[in-house]
Image: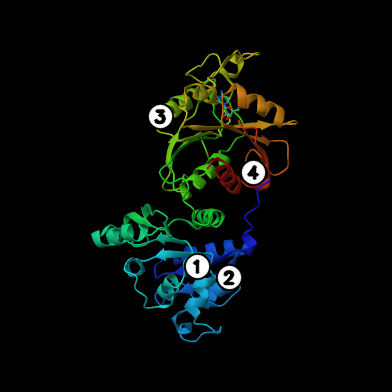
Amino acid sequence: MPSSTNLKSKRVLICVGGGIAAYKVCELVSTLFKSGLEVRVILTKSAQEFITPLTLSTLSRHQAYTDDNFWQPIYSRPLHIELGQWADLIVIAPLTANTLAKLAYGMADNLLTNTVLASTCPALLAPAMNTDMWEQVAVQRNWRQLLTDGRFYGIETGSGLLACDRIGAGRMAEAAEIFVYIQSLLHTQGNRDLAGKQVLISAGGTREFLDPVRFIGNPSTGKMGLALAQAALHRGAKVILVHCPASWDVPLGIEAIPVVSAEEMQQVMFKHLANADIIIMSAAVADVKPRDYSSEKLPKRSLPENLPLAPVPDIVAEIGNRKQPHQYLIGFAAQTGDIITPAKEKLQRKKLDAIVANPIDKVDSGFGSDNNQAVFLDKSGREVEIPACSKLEMAHYLFDFVV
Ligand code: C5P
């Protein structure tokens, strides 16, 4: 049984720079506190033009530090040393062009930059700035330069309408996305064990249409595949996510390819198969489709009493036949009742390297839930129970086993 990432014992230091995206950090700090993490906050002088230390001290249940506290240590040691050594993870959000430049050159002229230099833990960077600022040659050079240092992890900026009314790049990642990245880094302690690997993942429930409005489908929401994609990305992989219609947004940095039917999914999976090192079929593929398709909506009276069905391709079994020895193939088996016996049978019949047997008849796991529980089985006979945990945590356990 894998040991759980106990968020409650982890310490996260949030460093807030001066940009309008600072407002999103309030939500992030609130989420971190509610999830049981210990949170401390530093605000730069310009960050305080946007949000106040009172806001963040209230949300983190602890004093929020500013440069005014820099030379007034409340502990026996200087504050930047104390905070730098206290943190398991530092998050700089929003990262401004100014702080980015200072960090790229190792400068230390305020509490934030001194604390970063006085620490050795992983540091997650969430830049935010006006498009022209972000695209400056100097800013891009500093960004690339900083990311060559292995302790820094960058969350890509998004594009959209910015607060300066410009439409373009430079928008800070949402608090929810930063939170997922934080959980990943706390699990891996910054280990990029999938660097240089390509991970191909399928997610969600396929839809097999009878006419333009009716289909055979299933309740899969694709959340497990999304969590696998996020975990792989945060461990350094290049990720391709082939997903069925979903209600979530694909995080930046993941190549997402939307599909609808099993046949479409098969085509896309095969197209990207050759370059993949790890292939994970977490999609719930409809095993059958209506034999006939009508391009016009069928009137109610024309619906057949018994719907003739035809099989769809078994994608993972075909990948099992085609895969190269260096490729690692994982399937999922969503089951009711005995989850082990059918999973073992599928592991062999579909020529998988491993299978994840997960119950869909338990409370708060399986389809649609943010949590899951499963038994991981592989072809060497390993059988590991993964108790109820978040889908992101489960994704990390699976990669721990595989890597
Ligand atoms: O449906 P079944 O329980 O056999 O699914 C087990 C595994 O097979 C899953 O990984 C699923 O994604 C895959 N599968 C597939 N093509 C199908 C049916 C299932 O790739 N037509």
Image location (x, y in percent) of residue 47: 42, 73
Mark 3 and mark 2 in contact? Answer it, CB < 8 Å: no
Tell me the element at label 2.
helix
Q: Visible in this render: residue 247?
A: no
Q: Amino acid at mark 4?
A: Ser
Query: Can you identify the residue that label 2 sits on?
Result: 60
Tell me the element at label 1.
strand
Closer to the N terminus: mark 3 or mark 4? 3
Q: Is residue 318 above or below residue 145?
A: above
Query: Can you identify the residue that label 1 sits on?
Result: 14
Mark 1 and mark 4 in contact? Answer it, CB < 8 Å: no
Tell me the element at label 4.
loop
Closer to the N terminus: mark 4 or mark 2? 2
Closer to the N terminus: mark 2 or mark 1? 1
Decide which of 92, 247 is in the foreground and name it.
92
Mark 2 and mark 1 in contact? Answer it, CB < 8 Å: yes
Q: Which mark is residue 369?
A: 4
Query: Can you identify the residue that label 3 sits on?
Result: 274
Image location (x, y in percent) of residue 56: 53, 72
Decide which of 165, 21 is in the foreground and name it.
21
Image location (x, y in percent) of residue 183: 55, 55
Residue located 52% across and 66% down the image: 26
Closer to the N terminus: mark 3 or mark 2? 2
Q: Is residue 288 above or below residue 113?
A: above
Q: Is residue 289 above or below residue 95?
A: above
Residue located 61% across and 24% down the image: 348
